[in-house]
Image: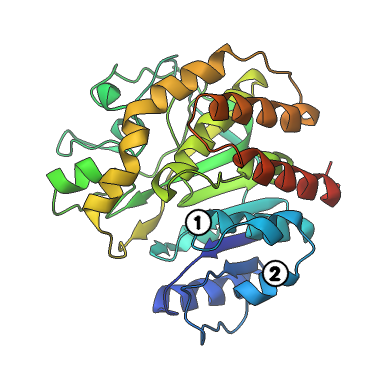
Amino acid sequence: MKTGLVITTINQVNKNIKDIDFNCNSKKWDFYIIGDVKTPKNFKIKYGNYLNTDFQKKLKFKFSKICPFNSYARKNIGYLLLAKNRNDFIVETDDDNYPKKNFFRNRLLKHNTKKILNISWINIYKFFLSSDKYFIWPRGLPLDEINGDQIRLSNKKYENNFYLQQGVCDLNPDVDAIYRMYKKKIDVKFKDIKINIASSLTPFNSQNTTWHKSLLPLMYLPVTCTMRCTDIWRSLIALRILGINSMNIMFDGPTVFQKRNYHNLEKDFKDEISMYMNNKKIYDILKKLKLKKGIKNFDINLLSCYKILVQNNFFKKNEIIFLKAWLIDCKNLKLN
């Protein structure tokens, strides 16, 4: 199946980006880097496609014409381009996530895995640790759930199609600012296993994520929240919509390791406060919504989710303008 990869960056070309560019070319993956106003003017890669802001303005997508600068949500433009090129799988990562060799393996829809039996919030990182040496939780997990219920697994494996596959990250995984201020040195090695999260609840991120093309509308990264919240709140909405369609999410072992770019932890903490306080509340609000089953109803379900979250002041009113532009672009691609 045809595969494409997207990242966004405001940094100089480094060895990691060069390696990703080379490997995408070798594997015949489409590769897009979406720039922003802070991306160096001399940014250039050898094989893939780098799109500066001037180029993005010329695209015919409605979303690219209204998306603000200095926004991680510009990554949405990359999703649209990869979908336009008829990629079956759209993979995303970040410029400080270094792929291992198995990152570039052929993506498969069908996998044979055990499933998690919990129907509550879980600390998914516990499943990937071989000992209790680390006390760690993923960014976005409600803080009162970091010591939550023991993860219970099925006795046997089941074969399923996984339209969304989330890989974990070795060395310096995705954790929140509270954890980073508590633990100055992070060096984690996760087990190379995979699991169907089934009806359990866990946020997922945009650092090592594979989407099937049929989920394109759900890839939307919201614009009017902080960068530290955007992929997490996207995941809560996707969990709700995929859940009513019995579409499973697979968490996979580490295919990348992170050498984290510099972050101001106090700023990250400030940008994550709304996440700490509201993730459970957001999902509870979404759970009460009456949504319609079927991929054909992704659009109307997304609008319902975002409208109720705007009404509850999690997003600004103009989020709906950005979302509608995105949905028009998705519809114009005629993927289904």
Q: Tell me the number on the disc at residue 57.
A: 2
- Position of the N terminus by quadrant: bottom right
Say which residue appears at 50% left-offset and 58% top-offset: 71
Point out the residue furthest to the front here. Answer: 317
The residue nearer to you, when weighing 173 against 99, is: 173
Say which residue appears at 45% left-offset and 14% top-offset: 119
Left or right for 59, reference 283: right
Quadrant hosting residue 243: top right
Is 261 rendered above or below residue 267? Answer: below
The residue nearer to you, when weighing 255 against 76, is: 76
Is 10 rendered above or below residue 334? Answer: below
Q: Percent from the top left, x then y, of residue 301?
A: 69, 26
Which residue type does callout 2 highlight?
Lys
Q: Can residue 86 be seen in this view?
A: no
Q: Percent from the top left, x then y, of residue 7?
A: 53, 63
Nearer the camera: disc 2 or disc 1: 2
Q: Which SS class for mark 2?
A: helix
Left or right for 3, reference 227: right
Q: Is residue 71 visible?
A: yes
Disc 1 designates what residue?
Answer: 72
- Position of the C terminus by quadrant: top right
Say which residue appears at 67% left-offset and 25% top-offset: 304
The image's colouring method is rainbow
Is 98 rendered above or below residue 92? Answer: below
Left or right for 186, reference 215: left
Is 275 rendered above or below residue 282? Answer: below
Q: Do the residues labelled 2 and 1 touch (CB within 8 Å)?
A: no
Q: Percent from the top left, x then y, of residue 90?
A: 64, 53
Which residue type does callout 1 highlight?
Tyr
10 Å crowding of disc 2: few (<14), some (14-19), many (20+): some
Disc 2 to disc 1, C-alpha distance? 16 Å
